[in-house]
Amino acid sequence: MMFWRYEVTGVDTVTLHFGDRIDIALADRVHQAADAIAADMGDRLMDIVPSYTTVLLRYDLSRDDLSSLLSDVSDTLADLPAIGPGDSDGEVVDIPVYYDPSVGPDLADVADRAGMTVDQVIGRHSGELYHVFAIGFAPGFAYLGQVPEALAVPRQSTPRPKVPAGTLGIADTQTALYPLASPGGWNLIGRTPVTLFDPGRDQPSLLQAGQKVRFVPISRERYLELGGRLDDLPWREEAQAPASEGGQP
Amino acid sequence: MTATAGQGLVVTRPGFFTLLQDAGRRGVMHLGLAAGGAMDRHAWAWANRLLGNAYDSAALEITFGNVEFTSELDTQIAVTGADAACTVNGEPRPLWSTLRLRAGDRVALGVPKSGIRSYIAVLGGFQVSRGLGGSCASFIREGMGSLNGDGCKLAQGDHLPCLSGLAPVANRKVPEGWRPDYKTPLSLPVILGAQVERFSAATLETFFQRPYTLSPQFDRMGARLKGPALAVTDNTLISEGTSLGAIQVPSDGQPIVLLHDRQTIGGYPKLGAVTPRGLDALAQRPPGTEVRFSPVALHQAQREEHEFLSFFNA
């Protein structure tokens, strides 16, 4: 039995709240709840959006009403087995990353701030198993945590106008890959050759909330073999370019 | 007669911002992608309904008018929404009504006198392939939907495929009393959320009694309003899924109403959500319009939304 409460967040949306802190044990419970609701409700829900501590449900007002929905959600959640910290069965996704200053222009700065060598930073960052807390900001953009405290560097004060697709960044204790080229203020430390979001795939987003992610360091040769690009790096022009009007995570 | 796809409307003047829109995507928000869909569902749904099209049919959403299309086929269209002069081969034609087009006819819209978004539906709906979430709603930022699945707004020379050979529908028009006046003062109904407790009683009184002005930062993602700043007692919020119409209050205290192409998760405290019917009306107001907010009970908002859906999407 888990504790939860709901908040009406729109004419056809309700947000379930499971707690008020960012940690993996709570996130595991949130994603367990989201998966169970999705499995029980199927097409009845128009959208289901898990995040760190919440699950937003959008229902079809022409076929459903809030009280019957909440009653069924309540039944689903009452049947969930308890999970302890660490025994979540979240699937682990391995993502190859070329950690290098050419594709991660902040790698040296992160190492300086942490008082480590670049190799030590790579070892610490890739030695962690990350939890996909939420997908948002942009299609396929996964908020991953937790980055070891020693590497927790705050966001850049001026966002870069363009970060190439696949770039890996750190902001405080979170880390993320940019699925598509976009403005971004995270500290960039590497890049994956893997396509993170492709609307033509059966699973458009490689990552789903609730999964676990492990970064596997690869060489420049392997990065290029896997289709990684080095011909679209904007770092040289960024000094002149204005910050975009667009949002950034 | 057998309906065939192929001939269509050719864009001869694309205007400032013309998109294909339908009822939006479903089941994609967990991928980080918002639903999208017509900004003013009321005018969009009427255009399709006049022609007997399915609710979900794709139609054109034209912002600030000034467009022209040439028809390659005999068909019918309906133009609704903003009060923009409509002509066929230069002759005035009524809005909110079915119109006959012959192959070679040129249909044009001027710059709106009131309202900002026009909708053009065609008999049978535009025949555009649907992508993710079962929709062809144009989403420029993410490069999705639209004619070629790239999200682009329409350009000169674009070809909008239609169905030929459909039996025409009887001439119909929307009764006068049902056509909205986009110049009337706007009061947006707000469903209050639990985060309303982060605002003091005095702040809420300000919000619901003083006018706000629609700023120029008003697009398909959101509408920023300017007015008395709203103080938030606690502005730390762990990012969570965003709902349509949510009123976010960032640290400057100026509210932002999140719209169809919003980001799917957000970390600003929310006062509540403007109802979809309120957003339909908002979609027709230009920047600079004075806007007020009024609280509405959930059951009342749901009843109105239910009436809307059962009328248009029965």
Image (cartoon, coloured by chain):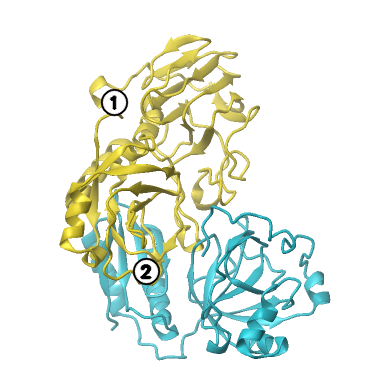
Chain colours: A cyan, B yellow
Q: Is residue B295 visible?
A: no
Residue B222 in the image: state x and y as whole percent: 41, 49
Q: Chain of mark 2?
A: A
Report whether B100 appears left or right of B306: right
Residue B145 against residue A24 in the figure, above or below: above
Label annotation for residue A55:
2
Quadrant assignment, res A227: bottom right
Q: Residues within 10 Å of mark 2 (few under 14, many from 20)?
A: many
The residues bearing labels 1 and 2 have C-alpha atoms spaced at a distance of 38 Å
The residue positioned 56% from the left and 64% from the top of the image is A140
B27 relative to B300, above or below: below
Q: Are there few (<14), some (14-19), or many (20+) residues within 10 Å of tag 1?
A: some
- For badge 2, the amino acid type reads Val
Whether residue A71 is visible: yes
Q: Amino acid at mark 1?
A: Arg
Q: What residue is rendered at 53% in x and 61% in y?
A: A248
SS for tag 2? strand
What is the quadrant of residue A37 in the picture?
bottom left
Q: In the shown orientation, is residue A127 left or right of residue B218?
A: right
Q: Which mark is residue A32?
A: none
Residue on which the image places disc 1: B179
Q: Is residue B38 above or below residue B201?
A: above
Q: Quadrant of residue A100?
A: bottom right
Could you tell me if the residues under marks 1 and 2 are in contact, i.e. CB atoms within 8 Å?
Answer: no
